[in-house]
Image (cartoon, grey):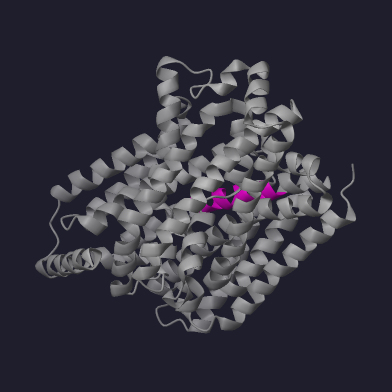
């Protein structure tokens, strides 16, 4: 059935709104710090909603919903795993990273690592930049993959043109407004996303006859859909549960997420923002799981489970509301893709071009280079999305693991342990990323998600190498001790 005029109109209206935000933000972008970090002036909602919206993308609205459709109640383990990651970020990382980055005047994660360890050789900056760029290429490709599926499901647009259109819109407003445009649009997109993931499953379940009817019909389809272990038993079951719970370990290592804390206006924003962010996460994750279960009942068998959200929206809602649901799906996708484009571009423009090759680069020149990199990475990711690698959930989890294992243990230890050294930091990044790749290529990820062993290996590598290499000099130790004392005093207030 062809999409209605109302559905198309609502979608176009949303797209115009996003582009207007990008244009307005571009008029306020005056400095390099503006473009990369919104001049460290993000307020409560921009910090809280944009940080969580940028981490939950097409993998939630399409991927997680699809997993729940396919696996049933066993998908519930993903939610506490991700919420555990929220707790790590907001209660352990956010305030300390915001303060340390401000004191060092660091604008990016590679910036922070080089400044924190006083690395004049640039080895940490270069290593971090390569890992970020490589992972973000695949990550953004997965987001554009999601746009292709969404346009195909609702507008019956060929997958290729859906990828191209979604990529073009995301690239344009990110290119124009930088970090401020990304953060502002993320607030709008995050609110639309959580609204869609709450309203659609609730309405569908009520229309079906309630939760009792839902569970009864799921049991009739397959009794395993109602067990939290699914069809897995023994070691296989343990591997599934550990892997899903382990997803949360990746949060402190996602540059596109933790840079939001670096951009927060002050520490009061962090203190209040945790309540908003965690509430948003609870609604989004459990909404996605119930939507997948609902889709299994009302859609029957579909060829691709990741089409569940758009199919249910079109089936249950009037075209105007279905158009709003489409906007919610694209909001989730774009809120991650834009952040990742900007982080990857800044990693090259700021951390390689300016800091290593062109230290006297003007603001105008640096912003131009950043915009060209956003365009280049966006086009490369679009090409990747046009390939046959279209399983969003698992594609994203691989990139998530690469970033989470490379930077997660390092960020946490760098904020709490003074004895960590430059070579310990380098070893941790290499060990985390290398373990992710090896675990995946050898097929061990079929038994347990690669992030769990990669995170542990990286943490061990950091500690061992730091203990066997020259400790930080007295000046650096004094700086770190003063920072820790100031932070502890602040957290007690």
Per the rendered image, the range of residues in magenta is: 134-147
Q: Main secondary structure of the magenta part?
A: helix
Question: Does residue 119 appear in this view?
Answer: no
The structure residue drawn at horizontal position 25% and vertical position 58%, both measured from the top left corner, is 415
Give how far across and how far down residue 313 sits, in percent. 75, 44
Q: Nearer the viewer, residue 466 or 55?
A: 55
**Residue found at the very far left of the displayed protein:** 474
The structure residue drawn at horizontal position 48% and vertical position 36%, both measured from the top left corner, is 78
Which quadrant of the structure image shows residue 447? top left
Give how far across and how far down residue 414 sits, in percent. 25, 57
Q: On the rendered image, what quadrant is the N terminus found in?
A: top right
Does 246 sit left or right of 312 as displayed?
A: left
The structure residue drawn at horizontal position 30% and vertical position 38%, both measured from the top left corner, is 456
Q: On the rendered image, what quadrant is the C terminus found in?
A: bottom left
Q: Nearer the viewer, residue 267 or 337?
A: 267
Q: Please tell me whether residue 143 is drawn above or below residue 487 in the rendered image.
A: above
Is residue 137 inside the magenta stretch?
yes
Count the labels in the image. Answer: 0
Does 425 sit left or right of 436 as displayed?
A: left
Does 397 sit left or right of 100 as displayed?
A: right
Q: Nearer the viewer, residue 16 or 493?
A: 493
Question: Does residue 460 appear in this view?
Answer: yes
Give how far across and how far down residue 429 sits, in percent. 34, 49
Give how far across and how far down residue 361 sits, in percent. 45, 81
Q: Please tell me whether residue 97 is drawn above or below residue 431 in the rendered image.
A: below
Q: Please tell me whether residue 325 is drawn above or below residue 359 in the rendered image.
A: above
Is residue 3 inside the magenta stretch?
no
Q: Nearer the viewer, residue 317 or 454?
A: 317
């Amino acid at each position: 059935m062809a999409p209605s005029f109302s559905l198309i109109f609502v979608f176009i209206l949303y797209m115009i709104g996003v582009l207007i935000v990008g244009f307005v933000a571009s008029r306020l972008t005056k400095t390099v710090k503006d473009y990369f970090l919104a001049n460290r002036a993000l307020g409560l909602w921009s910090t809280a909603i944009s940080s969580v919206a940028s981490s939950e993308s097409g993998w939630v609205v399409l991927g997680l919903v699809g997993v729940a459709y396919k696996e049933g109640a066993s998908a519930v383990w993903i939610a506490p795993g991700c919420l555990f990651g929220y707790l790590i970020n907001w209660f352990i990382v956010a305030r300390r990273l915001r303060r340390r980055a401000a004191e060092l005047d660091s604008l990016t994660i590679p910036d922070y690592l080089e400044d924190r360890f006083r690395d004049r050789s640039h080895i940490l900056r270069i290593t971090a930049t390569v890992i970020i760029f490589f992972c973000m290429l695949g990550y953004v490709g997965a987001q554009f993959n999601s746009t292709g599926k969404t346009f195909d499901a609702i507008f019956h647009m060929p997958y290729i043109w859906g990828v191209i259109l979604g990529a073009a819109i995301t690239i344009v407003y990110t290119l124009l407004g930088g970090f401020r445009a990304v953060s502002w649009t993320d607030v709008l997109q995050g609110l639309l996303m959580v609204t869609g993931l709450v309203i659609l499953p609730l309405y569908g379940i009520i229309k079906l006859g309630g939760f009792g009817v839902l569970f009864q019909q799921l049991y009739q389809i397959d009794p395993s859909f109602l067990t939290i272990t699914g069809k897995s038993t023994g070691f296989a079951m343990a591997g599934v549960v550990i892997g899903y719970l382990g997803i949360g370990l990746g949060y402190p290592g996602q540059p596109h997420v933790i840079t939001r804390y670096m951009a927060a206006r002050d520490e009061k924003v962090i203190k209040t923002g945790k309540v908003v962010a965690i509430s948003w996460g609870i609604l989004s994750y459990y909404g996605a799981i119930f939507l997948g279960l609902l889709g299994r009942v009302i859609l029957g068998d579909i060829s691709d489970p990741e089409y569940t959200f758009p199919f249910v929206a079109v089936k249950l809602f009037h075209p105007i509301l279905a158009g709003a649901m489409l906007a919610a799906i694209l909001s989730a996708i774009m809120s991650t893709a834009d952040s990742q484009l900007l982080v990857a571009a800044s990693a090259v423009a700021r951390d390689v071009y300016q800091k290593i090759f062109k230290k006297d680069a003007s603001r105008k020149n640096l912003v131009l280079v950043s915009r060209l990199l956003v365009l280049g990475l966006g086009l490369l990711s679009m090409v990747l999305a046009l390939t046959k690698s279209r399983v969003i959930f698992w594609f994203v989890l691989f990139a998530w693991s690469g970033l989470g294992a490379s930077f997660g243990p390092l960020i946490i230890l760098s904020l709490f342990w003074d004895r960590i050294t430059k070579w310990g930091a380098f070893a941790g990044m290499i060990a985390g990323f290398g373990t992710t790749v090896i675990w995946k290529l050898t097929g061990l990820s079929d038994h347990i998600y690669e992030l769990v062993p990669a995170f542990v290996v990286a943490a061990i590598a950091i500690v061992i190498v730091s203990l066997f290499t020259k400790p930080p000099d007295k000046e650096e130790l004094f700086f770190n001790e003063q920072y820790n004392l100031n932070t502890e005093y602040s957290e007690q207030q």
